[in-house]
Image (tube, rainbow, N blue to C red):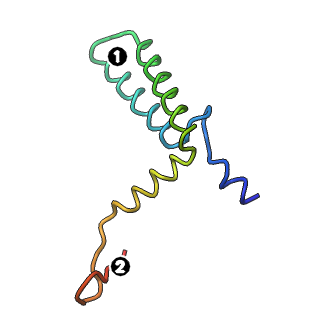
Amino acid sequence: MVLRVVAEPPQIFWAPVLPAAGNVLINISIMLFAIMYTNVNPLPFFMSMAIGHAFLVGWAVRDPHLSNLIVAWMETRRKTVNLVAAKGNKYVA
């Protein structure tokens, strides 16, 4: 059971969950603001969402663990605090 979860990362319509959710969130946010302020047709935003999703599907074929890579990258971007007074790189997360 554990091996299957590691081997098959979570996906939404063949795209990794985290980038697909980001794609939808960004496109819908821009669409809502554009509709509120300029009263445009929402169809181009759905088309760009579909194109972005297709791009993510293609990227997932090459690297299926893209969500895990993004989460790991965000963890490495965290600032560390030196809690121990010492010389050198003795940092604690």
Residue found 44% across the figure and 33% down from its top:
23
Q: Nearer the viewer, residue 16 or 64?
A: 64
**On the rendered image, what quadrant is the N terminus found in?**
bottom right
Question: Left or right: where does residue 69 sit relative to residue 37?
Answer: right
The residues tagged by marks 2 and 1 sit, at their Cα atoms, a distance apart of 47 Å
Nearer-N-terminus badge (2/1) = 1
Q: Secondary structure at mark 2?
A: loop
Residue found farthest to the bottom? 86
- Please provide percent x and percent y for residue 18: 50, 43
Question: Left or right: where does residue 48 sit relative to residue 60?
Answer: left
Residue found 56% across the figure and 36% down from its top:
15
Question: Left or right: where does residue 10 sit relative to residue 77?
Answer: right
- Please provide percent x and percent y for residue 49: 46, 24
Q: Which mark is residue 88?
A: none
Mark 1 = which residue? 35
Dot 1: within a 10 Å radius of its alpha carbon, few (fewer than 14), some, or many (20 or more) residues? few
Q: Nearer the viewer, residue 22 or 66?
A: 66
- Please provide percent x and percent y for residue 51: 47, 22
Q: Which mark is residue 92?
A: 2
**Placement of 40 over or under 62, stated as above or below:** above
Residue found farthest to the front? 62
- Circles 2 and 1: CB atoms closer than 8 Å: no
Q: Nearer the viewer, residue 62 or 21?
A: 62
- Please provide percent x and percent y for residue 56: 50, 33
**Placement of 37 over or under 24, stated as above or below:** above
Residue found farthest to the right? 1
